[in-house]
């Protein structure tokens, strides 16, 4: 389950409504009510945070966010790029980590801190000052 304090407006998450999961963008977070307002196209609804789920960060999600592969290494290592922002995933055990680079800043992020789309969005925003959204 996702933690409410991790969520911010602009984050892309999944929500469960009567057994159906939908992907949307967070437009508001109410810590007091423990609810999150999520936009699905032209409509937005409030959801209990227990119905919110993180989206695993995988190749398909990176492509949808506008990244493209610039390098594939042995053991599944990959490097991705979106403009001047690059991300290299080193999947070797036991030191699984990701290197994020934007202009003159580089972050060495250990695996648990960047397994989901919203976590990448937070790092991207912190480094570039721009929100990371769907490329469409």
Image (cartoon, rainbow, N blue to C red):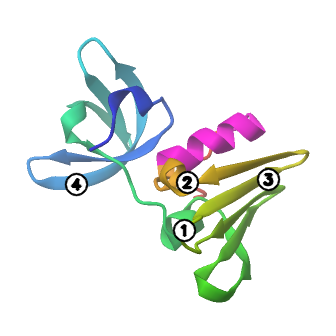
Residue at x 39%, y 55% (from the top left corner): 55
Inter-mark Cα distance, 1 to 2 = 32 Å
Sequence order check, earlier mark of 2 and 3: 3
Determine the image quadrant of residue 1: top left
Is residue 99 placed above or below 51 in the rendered structure? below
Sequence order check, earlier mark of 1 and 2: 1
Determine the image quadrant of residue 31: top left
Image quarter hosting the C terminus? bottom right
Question: Could one spot residue 42 in this view of the protein?
Answer: yes
Question: Could one spot residue 7 in this view of the protein?
Answer: no
Residue farthest bottom in this picture: 74
| x, y percent for residue 58 | 49, 68
Circle 4 sits on which residue?
Answer: 21
Residue 1 within the magenta-colored segment of the rendering: no
Residue 120 within the magenta-colored segment of the rendering: yes
Inter-mark Cα distance, 4 to 1 = 33 Å
Inter-mark Cα distance, 3 to 1 = 22 Å
Residue 101 falls left or right of residue 94: right
Sequence order check, earlier mark of 2 and 4: 4
Circle 3 sits on which residue?
Answer: 101
Magenta residues, as a range?
Answer: 118-130
Circle 1 sits on which residue?
Answer: 94
């Amino acid at each position: 389950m996702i933690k409410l304090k991790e969520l911010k407006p602009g984050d892309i998450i999944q929500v469960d409504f009567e057994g159906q999961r939908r992907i949307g963008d967070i437009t508001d977070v109410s810590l007091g009510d423990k609810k999150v307002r999520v936009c699905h196209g032209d409509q937005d609804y409030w959801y209990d945070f227990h119905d919110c789920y993180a989206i695993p960060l995988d190749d398909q999600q990176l492509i949808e966010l506008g990244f493209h592969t610039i390098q594939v290494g042995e053991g599944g290592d990959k490097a991705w790029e979106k403009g001047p922002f690059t991300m290299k995933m080193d999947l070797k055990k036991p030191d699984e980590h990701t290197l994020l680079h934007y202009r003159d800043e580089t972050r060495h992020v250990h695996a648990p801190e960047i397994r989901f789309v919203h976590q990448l969005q937070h790092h991207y925003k912190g480094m570039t000052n721009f929100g990371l959204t769907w490329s469409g």
